Amino acid sequence: MCGIVGYIGNKDAKEILIEGLRELEYRGYDSAGLAILNSGEFNIYKAVGKLKNLEEKTKDFTTSGFSVGIAHTRWATHGKPTELNAHPHLGEESYVVHNGIIENYIELKKELEKKGVGFLSQTDTEVIVHRFEDNKKTIADNFKAFETTINELDGAYAILLVTKSSDDKIFFAKKGSPLLVGKDSNGNVYFASSDTAVIGKAEEVYYLEDDEYGYAGKNDIAVFDKSGNKKSLTFKRLSTNKLSAQKEGYRFFMEKEIYEQSEVIADTMLGRLKDEEVFFEEIDDSFFDGIDEIKFCACGTSYHAALSCAYLFERVAKIKTSVEIASELRYKEPLLTKNTLFVVISQSGETADTLETLKMAKKAGLKTLAVCNVDNSSMVRTADTTILTRAGIEKGVASTKAFATQVCVLWMLSLFMAGKKGTISKESLKEQLHLLRELPKVLKVKQKLHDRIKKLSKRYLHGHGFFFIGRDVFYPLALEGALKLKEISYLHAEGYPSGEMKHGPIALADPELFTIALLPQNLLYEKTKSNIEELSARDSTICIISSKNEEIADDFIKIDEHSHYMLEFFEMMVVLQLLSLEISVRLGNDVDMPRNLAKSVTVE
Ligand code: AGP
């Protein structure tokens, strides 16, 4: 998830672009860059790291007179955070910035390399500008060449492109990643990934729809739909409150990130689901040679993601799998054998305990893999290879979309391994791929559900504690639900295997003990239901999350009916996230910055 900004007009384009990027840093900041076309010449600046490095590089540069400019702050999905990989990307006389993922970039790049085109970066984005310039050789009109280029791209994108031979225009296109175009009463034109970047500049904006594209010049904005028909645009007046704009109307970043899960999970899967197989460009076929065991290691929510998917690796990929809490593994003098693949899961890639276990595994000669959300983090630089979760920046301390994308990556990895080992039939694999493609829809928050949870949350503000219970993959999900509640409401909660309640914890059952029961229809339904009945018989207050109500429930949160338990898993995950959010809001807590917690625990 990156941030892009564009400007056309007579103001100081550098200032406008830098200020815009500063408002978008929450979308990603491992590198940044800008390109300004002024008096027929390009001025290009790029810097690795936070935006202040780019500001330092451009501090003596200003523009005067008319110019067009594009800028970008990057959250790496392809290629390390380096200056070469930072946007804008250059062709012969054109620059491009892009947010999203070009799924067919490998094919496009190979075709261009055959024509002798040289690539400077490892990114998918660079193919856009080279394809455009290749098309320009046979298509005289630059906009037509741009239009042809866009039609060649598969995947998700928000694109701004400038070229010397159209030095008063910006070409743009939007599909799957956000992009708006704005204007003011002096004919200045602005582009941005979100309106935070243009508040105080643009007076009104138009939010582009998927498959819309066009060109803009001074006093001129033309937008076309997928069929090439020019659209008449209805601009909206722009709000003036920056922080609420960064939260894009949500009360908290955590709430925004729960709603974003539907969008980012599509990025997580982009380029990785083929017609009949899972594909990870980061992993070559020999990577699993000699591996007959997997050991996951993580902390907190990331540990829950690993625990959830360990069931899938044993069930589907038929490989012995274990899961360790990093702070425990560090000091237990573990038996680490060379035939074990050591996998660390981490949103930040900086968690001290997890990082230390990764170093232990490497020292013991194990093959290592990091499933991580932050490229160039310590774990990414230490592991043999990495699979990025592509969740974009997660600002809420209580992890939501990072967890969802971790489970998605691990689910895909279990299928990838099963495919390599031949432990899954082609038909079953295709069914699983279909289920994965359902996730963006499953994760879309239904307002009716959110309203129901908001209403229900008033009943759960006291009591002497919560049990979250579930079986199989729903047990780690219960742990995660309990952690979410503890983190942001400060109420005591624990996750428990529902089959374990009768081995002691049921002694706590009474009307003041709240049980949140995860009751899937597609996995161990009867077993889980009987555990719930045991609690209900002892007068525990029970809230069931399921697609079908049960008369034993005091409260019931309905999810959709699904054909597979993993889809039930993801929809129940959203319910648990929203439930902890709404309870915390009612208790008046700081949802995004809960007491005593840090986003990344870089100390022991
Ligand atoms: C999750 O909501 C917490 N913020 C915390 O448990 C977190 O998952 C844990 O500290 C691990 O962080 P990491 O994923 O960045 O390694």
Image (cartoon, helix red, strand yellow):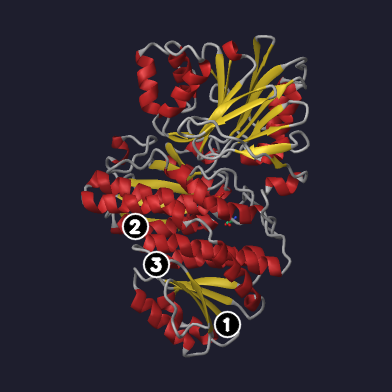
Q: Name the residue under label 2.
A: 312
CA separation in Å, label 1 and label 2: 32 Å
Name the element at disc 1.
loop
Question: Looking at the image, which residue is at 43% across and 28% down?
Answer: 151
Q: How far apart are marks 2 and 3 (CA)?
A: 21 Å
Image quadrant, ligand 1 = bottom right
Of residues 381 and 41, the one drawn nearer to the viewer in this rendering: 41
- Choose the circle earlier in sequence order: 1 or 2: 2
Which residue in the protein does label 1 denote? 513
Which residue occupies the foreground of this view, 309 or 173?
A: 173
Disc ID at residue 561: 3
Q: Earlier in the sequence, mark 2 or mark 3?
A: 2
Q: Which x, y percent locates residue 390?
A: 50, 42
Q: Rounded to the nearest whole Å, what is the CA distance between mark 3 and mark 1? A: 28 Å
Mark 1: give few (<14), some (14-19) or many (20+) Cα within 10 Å: many
Query: How far across and down, in percent of the image, does residue 298 sit?
Result: 49, 53
Amino acid at the residue labelled 2:
Leu
Tell me if residue 254 comes above or below residue 471 in the rendering: above
Crowdedness of circle 3 by 10 Å Cα count: few (<14), some, many (20+)? some
